[in-house]
Every structure is written in structure tokens, then in C-alpha cells.
Amino acid sequence: MTLPILLVISSGLFCIGLLAALSRRHAIFILIGIEMMLAAANLNFIAFWRFGPQPAQPTGMMVAIFAIAIAAAEAAVGLAMVIVVYRHFRSTNVDQLDRLKG
Amino acid sequence: MSTVAFAVIAILTLAAALAAATLQKLMHAALSFAVMFVGISAFFFLLGAEFVGLVQIFVYIGAVAVLIVFTILLTRDDTGKVRSFNWGGVIVAIAVFAGLVWAIAKTKSLPLTPSQIEPITVQRIGELLMTNYVWPLQCVGVLLTAALIGALILVMEEKS
Amino acid sequence: MVGLISIVILIPLAGAIALYIGQPKNARTVALIFNALSAFYAVMLWQKFDVTASGLQLVERHVWIPSIGAEYLVGVDGLSLLLVLLTSLVFPFAFSAQRLERGACALMLVTQAALYGTFSAQNFVLWFLFYEMTLVPAFLLIKIYGGENRDYAAVKFFVYTFLGSVAMLLAFLGIYFAKGTFDFAALAGLGKTGLLAGKLQWLAFAGIFLGLAVKVPLFPFHTWLPDAYQTAPTGVSMVLTGALSKMGVYGFIRLLVPLFPNEIKIAGPWLLALVICSIVFAPLAAWAQRDLKRMVAYLSINHLGYCLLGLFAITAGSTSSLIDMHAALSGVFLQIFNHGLTAAALFYFVGLLEQRRGLRGINDFGGLMQRTPLLCGWMSIAMFSSLGLPGLNGFVGEFLIFKGSFATAASFTAVAVLGLLFTAVTFMRAMQALFSGPLAESCGGFSDLVRGEKFVIVPVTLLMFAIGISPQFIFNIFNATVVQMARLFA
Amino acid sequence: MNSWITNNVWLIPAAPIAASLLILAFGKAARRAAAAVAIVGQIAALTMSIFAFVPTLHSHGFRAVQNFTWFTFGEQILRIGFVLDPLAAAMLLMIALVGLCIFVFSIGYMGEDKNFSRFFAYLSFFSGAMLGVVVANSLLLLFVFWELVGLASYLLIGFWIERPSAAAAAKKAFITTRIGDMGFFLGILLLYHRSGTLLFYDGGRGCLEPVALSAIGSSVTLVALLIFCGAMGKSGQFPLHVWLPDAMEGPTPVSALIHAATMVAAGVFLVARVYPIFSVGAINGVTPSLTVVVWIGVITGLMAALIAIAQFDIKRILAYSTVSQLGLMMVSLGAGGVAAGIMHLLAHGFFKALLFLGAGSVIHGLHHEQDIRKMGGLHRLMPITFLTYAVGMMALSGVPFFFSGGWTKEEILHATSNWPRSHLPHYLALIGVILTALYMTRQIIYVFFGNRRAASEHAHESPSVMAIPLIVLAVCAVFLSVVLTPAWPWLESYLTGHPARFDARLLIQPMIVVSLALVGAGVSVGIWMYRRAGEADPLQHAQPALFRFLENKMWIDEIYGRTVIALSAILARLSDWMDRHVWDALVQDIGRIGQFFGRVTTSADERVINAGVDESTSGAHGLGRLMSRWHSGQIQTYLGAVALGMLALVLLYAWLG
């Protein structure tokens, strides 16, 4: 268990999350992907804290906790939006949601 | 021992993540998603951040995963209607991964062994939250409240 | 206490506001009045300016945003004063070229204020603010008041210059984080030892270079220019070429060369190669143009190329003797002024032709000499000035530039001489097509220069002759600055 | 010794230029006044030239230099100045006098032109600029006037601007000479760089004086050759001679001025003026640069003389003869006969002006007919013109003893025979002499003898305003020979600064005999060949292919048209095309990467929907559509862009280490 391996794992998680967010059509998948990326970031925080020069100061941990809290809030709002969108369009496929098109 | 555990957890987590990202059925994906979070929590435990691991399990598996499942049920949209898969995303994801790994490999003097520490107790975290991090804590509290109310309003609006 | 420079900057702004609020019927007259006022103060500035002293003069320094090192710092040296005077000259000239709407007048005035600011600001944040402030009105002027194809040209102009600006801003942020100052003079002092470490230094150099090269423009970042100049209304084209394009060259002199002396030495041959491409390909492309405005636009690229040739030749070369340094810098400064004057005049004449004919293709005219000898005569003077005929302003500047750059970059200079030849070919062809031959039927009803046009043309042309025959009065403005800069670049 | 004029030499060129500006400013309506002002200006210049000439007579090697600061740049000073020495004084006199004759002639010739006053303004300007070239004491100032001469020639050649051919000829003249001038300009730069000064004479520090000459060092040959490029352009030397015959499109007085007094003389004068640069390090009077001058001169002289034989336009024949004579002058300069070259230039100025004005008189008398095949038998109808023309012809052919051209030509042949490098130029020059006599005889026979042909039926002698200048010039062409004879080589000694002695024994020299024999041969062959010449040229009968080759000017124009000009036109098109389709496209390609990304992220069936959207937005085109494609409105596209941006940042950061 070394820092580089942890970092590679977290980058792997991040990229899988990215993959989900970019490639899937379903809005919920995009949310899942985003959550995954956030989790990967959290993993980095913890890892750097643990391997860092000052592990007695749990700064990395605190950031991770806050990130989890914010991610939870984001998930709640995001899922609420999915439901609303579904009611409007009867679809959760993001490809059909291009009202922002210029 | 810890190395074996680490390897198992790593493989499990990544496999679950991949499953969550690629499985066709949303419900399966959601379950894999929960498994992945268990894996991440396990990492946290291994790294000595037990509290964060617990929080992760509570929040994600107890709340977010359940929320997702509920949403799936509410929208009755279990399978993605469009089966086609977007390869552009794959390319980008792989590119980003390669870039990140290259950056990691190129970075020298990354510490290889964790430093020995005393376990961080929940009490200490609580103290910190109430002292040094009290402002962020309050802000997160407000944020959570706002998010809760906002989510409710979003969902309720249609009914009225 | 508001200083003289601030007054000069504020007057056009006040004019813009007055036009906006007052909604006068004859907006152009109001704009010209404000122009006269700012020109008057610019001349006052010249009077107060001590030509024998080097360094910044009439400095105004106020605290602005201390936390990011931004302060309101304006001052002029010879170069800045020259450009302020040029701006004061070009804008009335441009306003008299055509009757612009109220909104266009207001936008032009905003541009003018921003230009005054750009040429006198001595702190990067302030400078960049003014620099970008010229972009938006110019964009709107092209987009709203432009001719055919204006959307495309305006967007292209904006995207190009804006991307360049972003690159420059990032580079400067990098420098600021390393050195903690935005002050030009302070940064120039630090330039010799290198502002940033390693590759970052090169990145910063590339960013600033890109931003300025787009503005000048330097080959191959020039393709926005023909479109923008072609479609913009005559007055706006005159301002774009006469004053706005000078910001790029000014930036090169004020920022890039002092800040990155070592990088310029290393990249010198490549930069000179780009400059040579500007000088040689632009008039060639101009030769192939059918649209007169586009032709003049391409020649504009060529003329600004000479400025950069002089600048890069003395800074990139290993050893420059003092006389070459002074010659090249003086030539560059003079060329900046000359080009502003001459190119604006050329656009003015093309505008006159367009007003009379409704078209401006080179083949839409013919035999004009028989119908409008005065117009042809004065236009020829502007053309000869542009192709560097001795006795007119273009020659002195070009001779000094070539003199200065020949010492250190003889082969590049020798190739650049081709540019002079191609420019001549282009103008000769234009003159042949426009003036000679039997009178084209469509040109039969043309009127020759009317009184109002003569009032505009004669002073400008006389100024060209004055600079060509006895240029000392222009040199006096910046001689001290040349000496100082030569010392800085050496 | 110094009179007021030696300190104010600048007044001489200033007088005609001032006259020109005066006419341009006020002379629109007043035709007579315009001509009067121009002539007064020219008389003033002539008077001052005489005054300036006087002091140079008194002492040998006289030189009055007057330098001043043009401007100060930085801490450096750029100085220019004026000089008066025998070379300048002699040229001044010739230019002013010939110019004056041409001015007077123009009153008659251009009498009916509607832009009469403008013509005189240009003429004055031309004369003034040329006078400026002569008195300049700085290569830079010389270049300034040099270019003004070019401008004036442009304006005058294209004077009848409504004729497309005139405009084209003017353009050709300006551009061709400018090609040479670019070389000249580089030469100036190199000289300035090496020697640090552009003043010719500056109390020992000028660039023609030993200190600076030695400072130029090894690049002196290059300097000389680059300067010679300018001379080649202006003096119509091969390969830049092509503009000179075309310049006949201008009114005939202009041709006279260009071919005699101004413009073409400038090139020869330039070489003579900077001769010290050419002759640095000479061994037996031979340097690499002078060798080039000789060969260029020989090629030009022979080529032009050959072409002249096969031309039918009265002015073109004279034009090619000018080119040929200029070649001869260059040969002389290159072979060391500087004085001979300048003397020939001066003499040529008179008799060539005479010939051109005579031709002008013929053309005027024949109502603007220029083809010699349509003339004939004019010696009865236009006796004054005929006599003066004959004088000019003999001078040009080099008939010795009584005509100035004979003596100078003899001097040139003498110089070439002593050239140590090779004797070929000498023999070629001898051939040139024969050819000159031949084509002039041909012209005279065609124009003045034989039957009256189509155009000469209604010919009339020209009015006295045109005849008097002819007579004056003819007298000059004859009497100039007095100061040219080897028996009393006054002009040569005046130019070289050695006192002249009278020695009648020198009158007969071997070279004179040779010269006489050659001219005689040329003339008699000419008479024999063309005695019964009709509409068709005898040579055309005998050698059709050769004749066509020469008639078409050896196809040099065509060769240039197909090569240099075509190439640069293609280059221009290419530059334009590159601009539109390569450099511009580069930026658009960057946009297209975004477009590509959008396309990849959009699945196949989705594109059907997008296509509908695209159609509705097809109003926006080009970049606009491109930009809007970026804004696909699809959240995933944005997300992908963000990811790529992040990737770029990561890579950048890692690369920077």
C-alpha cells in the first residue's frame, strides 16, 4: 500500500466516473458518475493526509467530511431535478435535453 | 495481510465502479454503486480514517444509494432507452486516465510508507469541528438545509 | 487633482456619455468637438513634455486595488506621447471620413479614450483594462455598423484578439505571482535576470507574444485583419489601422522586449522569419486582392512588419552598435506614426471612392484621372507615401529601420527589401487600374474633391511632406526615449 | 574662389522644383503662365549653373562641399550635403541647357494638349530632380533625388494616362527601375554599415575618401555591384533595359528628356560619382566590379544596336540607340575611361536630345505618325528638321572631326583597347560602332529620302518654337567637338583635373582612322542596303528569321512575361490562397476539433435530430455555425470539454515539473 498505487486507484475511479458521466444517456448515470468522481477525490484527500508530512493534523479528513456532506446535498438536488425533468419530458435521456443549444 | 486485503479491496472497488458505469440496468448499476462505496470506505479504514469511512457508509449507502433507487422507481425508467454507447466519452476518459497516470509516474519523491500516527478519535474530530472548522460546519449546515428545501420545492411544484 | 493625462483620457469618455445622454442630432459634430478638445489637451501635453529628459513624465499615481498590485499609474515618455498625438490625429480624421450614427460615434469615442489609456498606462492591470476596453467597442462597431459579412468578421476579430488577450493575461498572472508587481518599469528592471523559472518563463513569453502578435498582427496570426478591415465602415477601418494596430507594436516595445530579453535572443531568428513572412507575403497577397480595402489592409500588415523587423533585429542580434540601435528604434517609432497617418489616409481615399461609386472593387473604376484629377493626385500622394517614396514620410522611417536592422540581420533585411518592391507593384497596379485608361462609364458622374474633403486631405498630406522633408520635429519627441531604450535593450 | 552659388548649390535643383510646385498649385487655368513659369525656372537653373561653372574653371580639382544635418535620431546625426565639382558642374550645364531646349520645344509640341500646364509642372519637376541627383553630396540624398527622378518619369511616361499602353509603360518603367533601386538601397545600407557615413566628401571622412574606403574592406565589391544595380535600372542596362523602349509611350519631349538629359544619364553619372568605390584595390585599373560593368555594358550595347536595326518606330530606333550608347558609356567607365564615359554622356545628351526633338518634329509634322515605313522624302518638306537631324545622326554615328560624338567615341574605343583583361569588349565595341552607323543610315534613308509614302503627303515643317531648339542643339552638338579633340582635350582635363595643352599633332591618331573607317563602312553598307528600301525591309527579305528575332526585341519581354512576372503573379495568387485556405483554416481547424468532439459524442440516431436543428439554424453560417456547434446544449459535451481542459492543465503541470 503506497501512495502512488492509491493515486492510481483513485484516478481509475475518477476516470470511470468520468466515463459514466460522459457516455451514458441516462441522467441518473451522470449523477452516479459525478458521485464517483467526488469519491475518488475524497480518497485522494485521505491518502495525501495519511502519507503527508503532518498526519497529526487531520485536515485532509476534515475536507473529506465536508465534501461528503456537500456531495449528499448535490445528490439530493440532482435527483430531485431528475424527477422534475422526467415529469416534464417523460424521459431522463439527456440527449433530448438540449434547450441550452446556441 | 494488509497488502492482500488492499489488493482485494482495490479490485473489488474498481470492478464495482466499472459495473456501476457500464451495466445496462439502472437498478444493477445502483447496487454496484453501493458496493463501490463500501470499497472506498474500506480504503478509509485501512488508511486510518475510520470516522470518514463510517460517514461515507452512512451517507452514501444509507442515503444517496437509497435516494437513487427511489428515483429509479419514481421515474419508472429502469433501462436506458437508448442503447447506443458514446465512444467519445470513453476516449476522453482513457485519455484523462493516461494523463493522470503519467503525471503520477513523473512525479518523483512521493512517500511510499505512511507515517505512524495516533488514531484520530471522534472526540478530536468533534472538537475540531466545533473550533477550527466551525464556520465551514455552519455553512454546510445552511447548504444542506437549503438543498433539502430546494429539492422539496422542485419536486412539489408540479403538484400544486 | 486630475492630471493632464487623465483629462486627455476622460474627455472622449465624457463625449461618449454626452452622446448617450444628450442624443444630439448631429452626433459627428459633437464627437469632433470633443476630439478637438482632447487634441488640444494632447498638444498641451506635448508642450509640457520635456523632450530632453528621458523616463516617464507627468506621472499620476493613485492607489487603486492594492491587494493585487494594481494602481492607477499613468505617465508618458516619448513613445507614449507620440502615440497619444497620433491617436488625437487619427480620430478626427476618421470622424471626418463619413457620417456615422450616434451610437457609432459614441463607441468610437470610447475606443479613443481606451487608446489614450493604453498608451499612457504604466501598470499592467490598468494597461490591460484599457487594452481590452478597445476590443469591445471595436467589435460592436464592426458587428453593428459593418458591411457585408460583418458577423463573421466581427466574431473572428473578437475570438482572435480575445484568445490572444487571455494568453497574455495568464502569462502576466504567472509573472505577478512570481514577482509580485505589475509595474512596467519594475518588471523591465527584473527582465534581465529572468522573471520566472525554467519552462514557465517560455510559457509566459509565448503567451504575451501571442497576445501581441494577434493584435499587430504578425504572420500567421493576421487572418482576422483583412476581414475586419474590409467590412468595417471607413472611419472604423481608419481607426483600426491608424491607432488600434499600434497597440500591438507598442506592447512589443513596452512589454515583450524589456521583459524577455534572453528569450528574444534565442527565438530571434524565428521571430524574424515570421516578420519576413509578414513583410513579403502580405504585399503579395495584397497584389492578388480585388477589393481595395482588403488590399490596403494587407499592406498594413506589411508596414507593421517593418516595425517589428527593426525591433527584433536589434534585440535578437548579438551585438548592435549604438548607431544601429538608435536608427532602428527611431525608425520603428517614426514608422508607427507614419503608418498611422498613411494607412488611415489610404482608407479615407478608398472610402471616398466607395462613397462615389457604391463599390470598391479594383475593376469597378477606370480612367478616374480624367474625371477627378484632384482626387487621383492626392490619393497618389498617399500611395507613394505608403510605398516609401523619398520626400514623403514613409521613406525616412523605413530607411532608418533598414539601416538599423541591416547591421545585425543583413540577410533578413535583404529579403525584406522585396517587400518594398511588392508594395510598389501592388500600388502601381492599383493606380493603373483606377486612374488610367479610358473613363469607365460608371465613373462618369463622379465629383472631384469637394471643399470639405480638401479641408481634411490637405493638412494630412502636408504633414506627410513635412515629415518626409524635415522630420526633426517628430524625432524631437522621442529622441531621449530612444536613447534610454537603447540603453535598456543593449 | 567661392562665389555665393558654390555655397548655395541647392538653389539649382530648387528652382525648377519650385516652378513645378507653383504650376501645380495655381496653373490649372493659365496655360501660357504655366509654360512661362517652367521656362523661367529652367532659365534660372541654367543661369545658376553657368555661375556655378565659372569657379570650377579657375582651379583644377575644384570641389565645394556643403554639408549639413538633416536630422538627429537618438544621439546620432544624419548628415547630407551638396557638392560642386567639375563633374557636377558639367552635368548641370548640360542638363539645364538641354532641358531648356526641350521645354521650349514642348510649347509647340504639346500646344494642343488639354493638360498642358500639368505637363510643364512634371517637366520642371523632372529636371529639378535630375539636377538634385547631380549636386547631391550624400548617397542618401542622391537616392532621394534618384527616386524622385523615377517618380517624374513615371508621371511623364504615363502622361497620356487615358491610353492603357502609356499607363502600362509607366508602370513598367517604375517597377523595373525600382527593382534596380532595391539593389541600390541595399548597397547604401551596406556602405553605411561598413563606412559609417554616406557623405561623398566630408573633409577626408567621406565614403569616397581613402579612410572610409579602406574601412569598407572586403565587401567593397558587393557594395559596388549593388550600387550598380541601381545604375542598371535607371540607365537601361541589360537585363533591366526593357522599360526604356516602352517609355516611348510618353510624349516625345519626355522621351528626349529621359534619353538625353535626365533619367538614363543618372545611372552613368552614379557610377562616375562613386567611381572610387568601384576602383578600390584596382590592379591595372581592373577590379571585379568594374569587370562586371564592362561586360554588362558590352552586352547591352551590342544587343540594343542589333535590335535597333529591325525596328520601324522612329522613336524606338532612337530608344535602342540610347540603350546601346549607354552600354558603350558603361564599357568606358568600366575600362577606366571615366572622363571618356562622361564626355560621351554629355555629348550624347546634346545630340540625342536633338535626334528626339527632330523625331518629335517629324511626328508632329506627320500628324502623329511614327512608323518609318510610312514616311519618306521629307528632306524637301522639312529642311530644318532634316539638316539638324542629319547633324545628330552624324554625331551619333561617330563621324570624327566635326561632330562631338566622334571624338568621344574615339576616346571610348581608346579606353577599351587598353583594357588589360580582354580585348573582346574592344572588338565588340567596334562592331557596335558599325551597327550604329548602319541603323542611323537606315533611319535617315527611310524618313528623309526615297519616295513620299502614305503619311508624308501632308507633312509640314514645324513652327519656329520647335525649330529653334533644334538649331541650338545642333550647334551645340557640333561646337562641343571643339573642347573634345585630343589636340586640345579641354573637357577631359577639366574633368580629370589635369591642365590641358594644345598639341595639333595629336589630332590624327590611329584610333581616329579606325573610327572613320568603321563609320564609313557602316554608312556605306547602310546606303547600299537601304537605297531602294520600300514598305518591306531588305534585311527582312534576306533573313526573315533573324529579322523577326530582332524585331521582337529578342523576345526578352516575352521571356520576362513568362518567367519572372508570371512567377510573381503566381506567388501573389498563392499568398492569397494560402491566406484564405491555410492560415485562416488553421484557426478554423481548432474550432473543428470542438466540432469533431461534438460529433463523436452525438450518437448516430441522435444526429438525425441534430440535423433538423441544424437546418433551422442554417442561416448562421461559417464561423457562426462552427461556434454554435460548440454550444451543442448537451451537458455531456460541456462536461467532456471540461475534462479535456483539466487534462491539459494536468499535463501542463506535470510538464513544468
Image: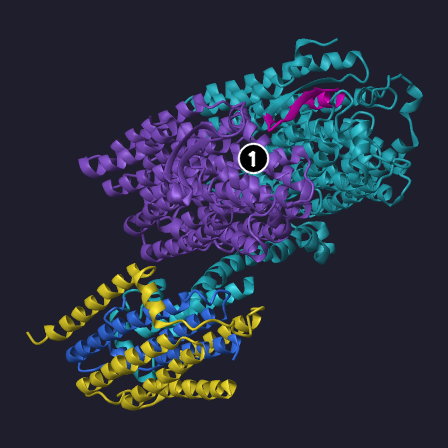
Chain colours: A blue, B yellow, C purple, D cyan
**Which residue matches tag 1?**
C397
In the rendered image, is residue C144 in sight? yes
Hey, which quadrant is residue C353 in on the image? top left
Please, is residue D395 above or below residue D45 in the view? below
The local crowd at label 1, few if under 14, some if 14 to 19, many if 20 or more residues have their Cα within 10 Å, is many
Q: Is residue D113 left or right of residue C485?
A: left
In the rendered view of the protein, which quadrant contains the C terminus of chain B? bottom left
Q: Look at the image and say whether residue D75 sits in the magenta stretch.
A: yes
Magenta stretch contains residue D42:
no
How many numbered marks, from 0 up?
Answer: 1
In this view, D135 is above or below C196: above
Q: In terms of secondary structure, where does tag 1 sit?
A: helix
Q: Position of residue D339 (x, y in %)?
A: 81, 28
Query: The disc numbered 1 marks a residue on which chain?
Result: C
Q: Nearer the viewer, residue B155 or D266?
A: B155
Locate residue D139 relative to residue D489 in the image: left or right. left
**C328 w.r.t. B36: above or below:** above
Residue name at image x 52 percent, y 29 percent: C55
Q: Residue furthest left?
A: B160
* Left or right for D370, reference D542: left
Magenta highlight range: D72-95
Which image quadrant is residue D10 in?
A: top right
x, y (%) of residue D67? 67, 20
Identity, as a three-letter code, of the amino acid under mark 1: Gly
At horizontal 81% and vertical 40% (from top left) the residue drawn is: D218
Q: Residue D393: x, y in percent?
A: 72, 33
